[in-house]
Amino acid sequence: MLCQDGHLHSKQLLPMGFAFVEKDHFESMARGAGFRVLELYGNYDRSPFDAIRSPVMIWVLEKGDAQPSVAADAPLNARLGLTVNKFLDSPGKAS
């Protein structure tokens, strides 16, 4: 926790367990829990997953009927739910 002046007041260490999970096993668990796989990246730069070369698996999942959210680095019009058109600039309308 931080004090009002921004200095560390106290900290708490939490025990964490990690396990290496194969791609097919993780995908099976995700689908079994009601998730749909939208993307699987192999690194933080969003490069494609390669089972031999990728250092990590970064999964983008969607739960059941949930609406996907728009990434913070998406264009402003996408984050606001606006359709930008050359001739008509109205929210939600396209020509």
Image: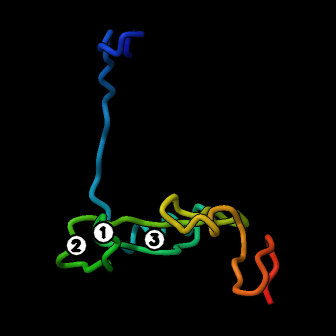
The picture places residue 71, in percent across and down from the top left corner, at 53, 62
The picture places residue 87, in percent across and down from the top left corner, at 76, 87
Q: Is residue 69 above or below residue 15?
A: below
- Name the residue: 51% across, 65% down: 30
> Mark number for residue 27?
3
Tell me if 34 is positioned left or right of 61 in this view: right
- Name the residue: 59% across, 64% down: 76
SS for dot 1: loop
SS for dot 3: helix
Q: Residues within 10 Å of mark 3 (few under 14, many from 20)?
A: some
Q: Are marks 1 and 3 in contact (CB under 8 Å)?
A: no
Choose mark 1 or mark 2, whichever is in front. 1
Residue tagged by mark 2? 54
Q: What kind of residue is marked 3? A: Glu
Report, in whole angstroms, how far the alpha carbon at label 1 lies from the one at label 3: 21 Å
> Mark number for residue 45?
1
**Residue 14 shows in this picture:** yes
User: Which quadrant, please, contains the C terminus?
Assistant: bottom right
Q: Is residue 16 above or below residue 52?
A: above
Q: Residue furthest bottom?
A: 95
Q: Are marks 1 and 2 in contact (CB under 8 Å)?
A: no
Q: Residues within 10 Å of mark 1 (few under 14, many from 20)?
A: few
The picture places residue 23, in percent across and down from the top left corner, at 35, 72
Q: What kind of residue is marked 1? A: Asp
Q: What kind of residue is marked 2? A: Ser
**Residue 34 shows in this picture:** no
Report, in whole angstroms, how far the alpha carbon at label 1 lies from the one at label 2: 11 Å
Choose the circle earlier in sequence order: 1 or 2.
1
Choose the circle earlier in sequence order: 2 or 3.
3
Classify residue 35 by image quadrant.
bottom right
Tell me if 18 is positioned left or right of 70 in this view: left
